[in-house]
Image (tube, rainbow, N blue to C red):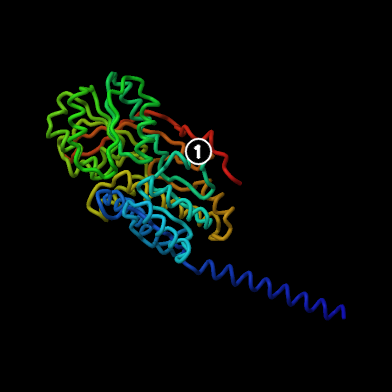
């Protein structure tokens, strides 16, 4: 009787071990699935395309693998719509059972996508959107930003405009969460007079009202956060109205990036903008990225492309350092928090709210040695080892 029980126990244990081994093998042989949901149509499409291209370049250089495992990237268009974004994210996490999500450009879409993503215990690696809500009271163990917190670049710009002695500044940003974060961030560091604040509709392309307001209020400078086609159209209209002779233009990296420069041209020479990255950053990872991006796509990368590239590298490190055991959410989270990858911006580390602590620089648009109109990074950081203003409100769940 005892011998029979022992044989049965041994058989059960062996069978259990075999099942566990089989399950582990099945998981390791399955591809890692990534849902890359971004804005690929409409006025903001160029931004989503750059994130996608940067991410897919990293995947190509990694042999289309993450952490040594084959990977499948499912690309979808959120159309810059919170409703479309949420519905598509729901499909990606439930039907396609993706292991990671990434790609969203706009923060209003990100806030809509968060609920189905986090509820499914799917890790979201942001390649752009960094809403203040997710940095503070709504921080989440499944959200990680491989980019910035929305206020940060604007805080650096406020510091630049303040240090250059401008006394009267007009502010223009879209009427959506990141636009409001932008103005909050700028005013946190700029202490002069704000002559006006304009909040045009997201993806607005005609700025005759804002131009007229600038003529009337006569500021020394104007600070714009107008992503994608918004920024291109505003700058063209600003120049056509003859305002640059009286008003100095400033922006975050987005509003003075390579996509905007390509569309607008020489009239952008001399414009200052702020960023945590520049294509001329002198580190090995960045040189590899920029050279590979130019070879693959025939253009200089933007900040969006750099963030997409870093998001893929962060995922690669997380799969590698969790030994591919993606069902072990605690192990994946620990690997993401460690962030052991070579970022194109140099040193990279997360704060306790899963947003980066990093340097922010001023860039100036100039002509390089090849005669190209492009950004040049100024060597000294405007803000060093900078953390966002919301981390104190984050009580990160265990």
Please name whichever residue, 355 or 210, is drawn nearer the observer in this view of the structure: 210
Q: Percent from the top left, x then y, of residue 136?
A: 50, 38
Q: Around disc 1, counting alpha carbons within 10 Å, would you say few (fewer than 14), some (14 to 19), or many (20 or more)?
A: some
The quadrant of the image that shows the N terminus is: bottom right
Q: Which residue was labeled with disc 1? A: 136
Identify the residue at horizontal 40%, vertical 34% (top origin): 152
Q: Percent from the top left, x then y, of residue 323?
A: 55, 58
* Dot 1: element: loop
Residue 395 vertical placement versus 216 (above, below): below
Q: Percent from the top left, x then y, of residue 269?
A: 18, 33
Please name whichever residue, 346 or 127, is drawn nearer the observer in this view of the structure: 127
Total residue callouts: 1
Identify the residue at horizontal 23%, vertical 31% (top origin): 271
Residue at the right extreme, as displayed: 1
Q: Is residue 367 left or right of residue 341?
A: left
Please name whichever residue, 218 or 25, is drawn nearer the observer in this view of the structure: 218
Identify the residue at horizontal 16%, vertical 40% (top origin): 265
Where residue 374 sits, quadrant-wise, is: top left
Q: Is residue 39 left or right of residue 269?
A: right
Residue 36 vertical placement versus 281 (above, below): below
């Amino acid at each position: 009787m005892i011998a029979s029980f022992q044989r049965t126990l041994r058989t059960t244990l062996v069978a259990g071990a075999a099942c566990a081994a089989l399950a582990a093998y099945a998981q390791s042989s399955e591809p890692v699935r990534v849902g890359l949901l971004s804005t690929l149509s409409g006025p903001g499409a160029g931004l989503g395309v750059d994130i996608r291209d940067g991410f897919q370049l990293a995947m190509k250089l990694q042999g289309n693998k993450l952490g040594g495992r084959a990977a499948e990237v499912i690309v979808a268009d959120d159309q810059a719509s919170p409703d479309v974004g949420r519905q598509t994210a729901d499909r990606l996490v439930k039907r396609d059972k993706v292991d990671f999500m990434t790609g969203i450009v706009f923060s209003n879409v990100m806030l809509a996508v968060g609920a189905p993503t986090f509820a499914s215990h799917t890790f979201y690696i942001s390649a752009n959107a960094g809403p203040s809500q997710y940095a503070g009271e709504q921080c989440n163990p499944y959200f990680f930003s491989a980019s910035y917190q929305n206020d940060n670049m604007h805080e650096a710009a406020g510091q630049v405009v303040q240090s250059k002695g401008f006394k009267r500044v007009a502010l223009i940003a879209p009427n959506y969460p990141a636009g409001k974060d932008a103005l909050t961030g700028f005013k946190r560091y700029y202490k002069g007079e704000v002559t006006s604040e304009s909040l045009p509709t997201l993806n607005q392309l005609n700025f005759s009202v804002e131009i007229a307001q600038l003529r009337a209020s006569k500021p020394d400078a104007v600070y714009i956060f107008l992503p994608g086609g918004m920024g291109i159209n505003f700058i063209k209209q600003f120049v056509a109205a003859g305002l640059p002779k009286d008003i100095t233009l400033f922006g975050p990296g987005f509003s003075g990036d390579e996509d905007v420069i390509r569309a607008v041209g020489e009239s952008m020479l001399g414009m200052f903008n702020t960023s945590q990255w520049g294509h001329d950053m002198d580190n090995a990872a960045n040189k590899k990225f920029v050279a590979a991006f130019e070879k693959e796509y025939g253009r200089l990368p933007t900040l969006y492309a750099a963030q997409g590239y870093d998001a893929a590298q962060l995922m690669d490190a997380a799969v590698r350092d969790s030994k591919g055991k993606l069902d072990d959410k605690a192990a994946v989270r620990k690997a993401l928090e460690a962030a052991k990858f070579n970022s194109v911006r140099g040193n990279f580390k997360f704060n306790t709210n899963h947003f980066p602590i990093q340097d922010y620089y001023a860039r100036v648009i100039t002509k390089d040695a090849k005669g190209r109109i492009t950004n040049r990074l100024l060597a000294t950081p405007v803000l060093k080892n900078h953390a966002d203003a919301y981390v104190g409100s984050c009580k990160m769940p265990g």
